[in-house]
Image (cartoon, rainbow, N blue to C red):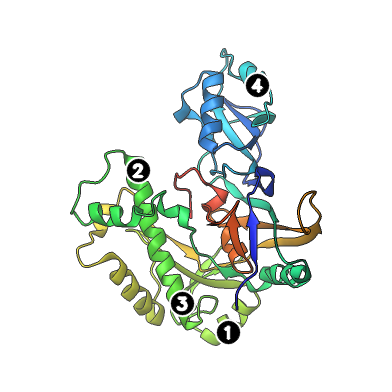
């Protein structure tokens, strides 16, 4: 059955992302935290402007996650602000210009690091949907809070030209030298990890077990703990209730592996995707590896119909909260055929990012 077609990101206000921090600044320390609002800028653009204005190296600016360019987003940044410098004075003098605004400032003891966020709250305007279908579409979105969606990585995770996986395999298999820049190597490796994860997830979807445990699965609790599945029937009941779910590989030298049926299933797919000449030891400095949930459950899902001047019919505003590393377009694609602006298929990066740097899974 064809999904109803929708447009979004026609204007930045169609895609609003509010970062949910893991902690708030304590009010004292040698790092100045800036809560910013940006429109039509990448996070890297905002970092560059703030760093240059405050007279600090761009590499010293801390961010928890990257946010979309075609959007209105809020997030925290940090800059070093030692006593005797005029960094805070310069930061307070930044005037809003329609693209960047400093909402508040506060001091903290440490630099903000990648992954120091709980998640993001999304408010997305979907345009062009059939008015008669809006009630059913709203119900479908609301149901995702219970059923969840496959926690796939979006297309932007794989680079602007979609060739990151091929490039990563080439240098990690010894066929090419790879990029000199270490950050570029890490980004390529993260793309390859994401590709393998998506391959495992796709196979689990095909067999109907993406949201159900296999014997030996590493299951992650909603509270964060992880354990091996030894009782499929009992753990399936808990999975249906949303208490836990299976995980997939973000492979690396220290990643914990599943057991029994799940191990055999996963090992075959990883071997197929990486090929016989892949050298796992070559990835040691690029990332230790981890487990990523196969199931993404959006929280606080809400929908409302809202008229927009100049539009033929009303729009649907969809709101939800996702954990860090999750993709808003993954949620949208479960219900509608979402396209950015005009006719191009929609894609975004984890945390709503379009900037291109990797962030934690």
- Taking the image as shown, residue 234 lies to the left or right of residue 279, namely right
Q: CA distance from mark 2 to mark 3?
A: 30 Å
**Vertical placement of 127 versus 182: above or below?**
below
- Residue that label 4 marks: 94
**Vertical placement of 80 versus 303: above or below?**
above
Q: Which mark is residue 184?
A: 2
**Mark earlier in primary sequence (2, 1):** 2
Residue 216 percent across, percent down from the top left: 43, 78
Could you classify mark 3 by the number of other residues whose Cα lies within 10 Å: few (under 14), some (14-19), or many (20 or more)?
A: many
**Nearer to the camera, 162 or 193:** 162
Per the image, label 1 sits on a secondary structure element best described as helix
Q: Quadrant of the N terminus?
A: bottom right
Q: Is residue 58 visible?
A: yes
Q: CA distance from mark 1 to mark 4?
A: 57 Å
- Taking the image as shown, residue 156 lies to the left or right of residue 68, namely left
Residue 269 percent across, percent down from the top left: 34, 73
Per the image, label 4 sits on a secondary structure element best described as loop
The outermost residue toward the bottom is: 233
Q: Which mark is residue 234?
A: 1
At 49% across and 58% down in the image, what residue appears?
Answer: 154
Residue 53 percent across, percent down from the top left: 56, 20
Q: CA distance from mark 4 to mark 3?
A: 50 Å
**Mark earlier in primary sequence (1, 4):** 4
Q: Which mark is residue 204?
A: 3
């Amino acid at each position: 059955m064809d999904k109803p077609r929708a447009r979004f990101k026609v204007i930045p206000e169609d895609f609003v992302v509010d970062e949910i921090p893991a902690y708030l600044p304590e009010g004292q320390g040698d790092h100045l935290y800036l809560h910013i609002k940006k429109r039509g800028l990448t996070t890297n653009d905002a970092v560059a402007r703030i760093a240059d204005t405050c007279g600090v190296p761009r590499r010293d600016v801390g961010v928890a996650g990257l946010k979309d360019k075609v959007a209105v987003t809020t997030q925290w940044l940090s800059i070093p602000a030692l006593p005797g410098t005029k960094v805070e004075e310069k930061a307070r003098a930044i005037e809003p210009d329609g693209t960047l605004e400093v909402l508040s400032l506060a001091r903290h003891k440490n630099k903000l690091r990648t992954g120091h966020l709980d998640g993001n709250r999304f408010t997305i305007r979907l345009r062009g949907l059939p008015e008669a279908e809006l009630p059913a579409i709203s119900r479908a979105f609301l149901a995702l809070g219970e059923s969840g969606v496959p926690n796939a990585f979006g297309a932007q995770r794989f680079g602007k030209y979609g060739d990151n996986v091929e490039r990563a395999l080439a240098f990690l298999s010894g066929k090419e030298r790879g990029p000199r820049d270490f950050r570029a190597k890490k980004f390529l490796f993260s793309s390859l990890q994401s590709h393998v994860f998506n391959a495992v997830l796709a196979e689990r979807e095909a067999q109907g077990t993406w949201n159900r445990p296999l014997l030996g699965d590493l299951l992650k609790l909603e509270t964060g703990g992880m354990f091996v599945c030894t009782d499929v029937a009992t753990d399936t009941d808990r999975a249906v209730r949303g208490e836990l779910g299976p995980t997939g590989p973000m492979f690396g030298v220290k990643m914990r592996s599943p057991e029994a049926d799940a191990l055999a299933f996963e090992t075959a797919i990883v071997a197929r995707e990486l090929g016989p000449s892949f050298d796992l030891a070559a990835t040691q400095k690029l990332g230790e590896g981890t487990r990523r949930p196969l199931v993404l459950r959006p929280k606080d899902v809400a929908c409302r119909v809202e008229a927009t001047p100049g539009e033929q019919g009303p729009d649907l505003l969809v709101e939800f909260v996702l954990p860090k590393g999750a993709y808003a377009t993954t949620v949208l694609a479960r219900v509608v055929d979402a396209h950015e602006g005009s006719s191009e298929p929609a894609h975004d990066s984890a945390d709503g990012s379009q900037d291109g740097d990797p962030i934690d899974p």
